[in-house]
Amino acid sequence: MNQTPTTAKTPTWDLDSIFPGGSTSTQYAAFREDIRKRLKATVDDFHRLPRKLDDSNLDAWTEFIIKLQDLFTRINHASAFAECLVSQNVDDNKAHQIQGEIDVFESELQKIFVLFESFAENQSDTAWEKLVTGKELVETRFFLDEMRRTARLKMEPQFEALATDLAVNGYHAWNRLYGKIYGDLRVDFKENGKTVRLSVGQLNNKFNSPDREIRKQAFEKLEEAWGSTASVAAMALNFQAGFRLTLYEKRKWESPLLEPLLNSRIKEETLKAMWSAVAKAAPQIKKYIEAKKKILGIDGFKWYDQFSQVGEMNKSYTFNEAADFIIDNLGAFNKNQADFTRMAIDRRWVEAEDRAGKAGGAFCTGLDFAKQSRVLMTFSQNLDSMMTLAHELGHAYHQYILKDTPRFAAEYPMTLAETASIFNELLISDAALEKADGVNEKLLLLDLKLQNAYILFCNIYARFLFDTAFYRERKSGLLSRERLDEIMIESQKKAFMGTLDDDGYHPLFWCSKLHFYITDNPFYNFPYTFGYLFAGGVYNRAREEGPSFADKYIALMADTGKMTSEDVARKHMGVDLTGEEFWNDAVSRCMADVELFVKLVNQKK
């Protein structure tokens, strides 16, 4: 490992190179004002164009679509920058106001799309074919065809436009309210004889502690904190779901799964095949947890134990050491990716400082207009943080591959969004395992791999089951906070395959997990498991073929916004995702380390 530091300390990111001055930036304000003017001009352009597409106006409509794509890019850029501002400082009230301003922009843009969808829907197939196969639009054809097909499933344009308007101060506002609640929550936490004030994001990091009492305290504090505001969170969840279900009813969409399936660009058969394969992992999952209980010296297994780690590693990682380790091992597979990752680190695209006032979790967002990305995380100088850094930098590399691709052809679904990030995780975890020194280190690394599978097979499945049951009951009316707790426990009992104690569930998970409140993506859960298993298949292919697979990998990533998830898998992997064979193989590979883990545990005991 290269130990030479590249920066003096855990870095904060550079946002000033995008817009200097943060939320008070005059350049950012001017950029947003320009968007406002472009929105109006785009609406005027649309109304000036003829309603019937033919050879005489193909060029004019092509020019309109290119301008619409540019507007889409600018709004995404402005939105991503606001997200960065709010995430680095949840108390930046000006940034919160800007997010509300951009919500209006997105609503106005969506109304333009509604108009355009209606236009597209009413054109002849022949005329539409000529438009989307023109040399300036052919690369975005999939996006445009998909938009046209989806338009046929929606309400009349005027009603879709009204729904978009109402969503700004209704539907999306519930998401913003939850985000504010999440950011404001603080708890008093006792550790090492001191009491410190922690944000929820900092508290979540405590679940990785090797000390069970610390994990238990973190869980109890989390339940206590969310219990104090659960009634408000229940309102937010109920009303945003009510908005969704009302919209679905007016569109005559019978299943709440239709929208997430469309967003994910997969068929329901694919989703069913995946969950069916996951269920077959139960015997191996149980064997893993029994071995883990044995080495932890505990009789039962509780919610907060799923994040525990066994084994130990005598070394810690500074941010720079972690970055160097990632870059060195990426370079053995793909020099292009290693060079990109070094550039992202050196240019301070990563915000990793551990401080109060930051948003919890980790993410990577694309600043499309600048052809850059930014990563937010809280680095804790451990292996888990190194894996998170590798994961988010995988997202950044995916965005880098697509930086010169037309924006409409770079709109990939969540199911494929996790491919590069999880590929990175698998690569780095295997590299660390190869360098492991002794049983303890091997146990730790194997546990991290299996823990990841456990969370994606059980924790994520519990979220899916909760959403499914919640939406089924929400059709009949509001659900109480107590009923939400009950559904969550029922979902966890099934999803965790009997591995959690009867008193080991997390009833307020529906409240504490921000993913349930994301209004842009309903059922923000199954794409993670999909991405994990699909990335595993890609990674296995890379291991079989070696560095020669790098070009194929880049080609696969480049196609993620140009076809369905099933077609990407068929074209680049030669597999059928609607059947169980691929998923069964993928699940088996994830569980392949259980036997070695159990063997090492028995050696320790």
Image (cartoon, rainbow, N blue to C red):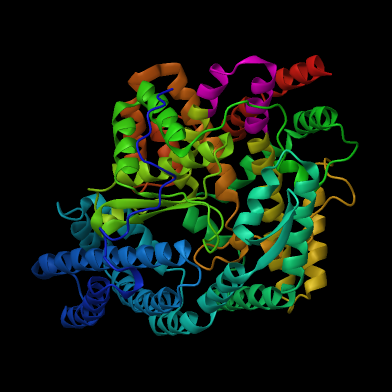
Q: Which residues are magenta?
A: 429-450
Residue 400 in the image: x percent, y percent? 30, 44
Position of 39 with respect to 185 (left or right) is left
Position of 39 with respect to 374 (left or right) is left
Residue 42 in the image: x percent, y percent? 21, 77
Q: Quadrant of the C terminus?
A: top right
Report if residue 126 lies within the magenta region: no
Residue pictured at 34% horizontal, 51% vertical: 373
Residue pictured at 62% horizontal, 41% vertical: 274
In front here: 306 or 253? Answer: 306
Which of the 4 image quadrants contains residue 94?
Answer: bottom left
Position of 182 with respect to 305 (left or right) is left
Q: Quadrant of the N terminus?
A: top left
Residue 82 in the image: x percent, y percent? 38, 68
**Residue 491 higher or lower than 486, as above or below:** above
Q: What type of secondary structure mainly makes up the magenta span?
A: helix
In front here: 330 or 498? Answer: 330
**Residue 7 higher or lower than 118, as above or below:** above
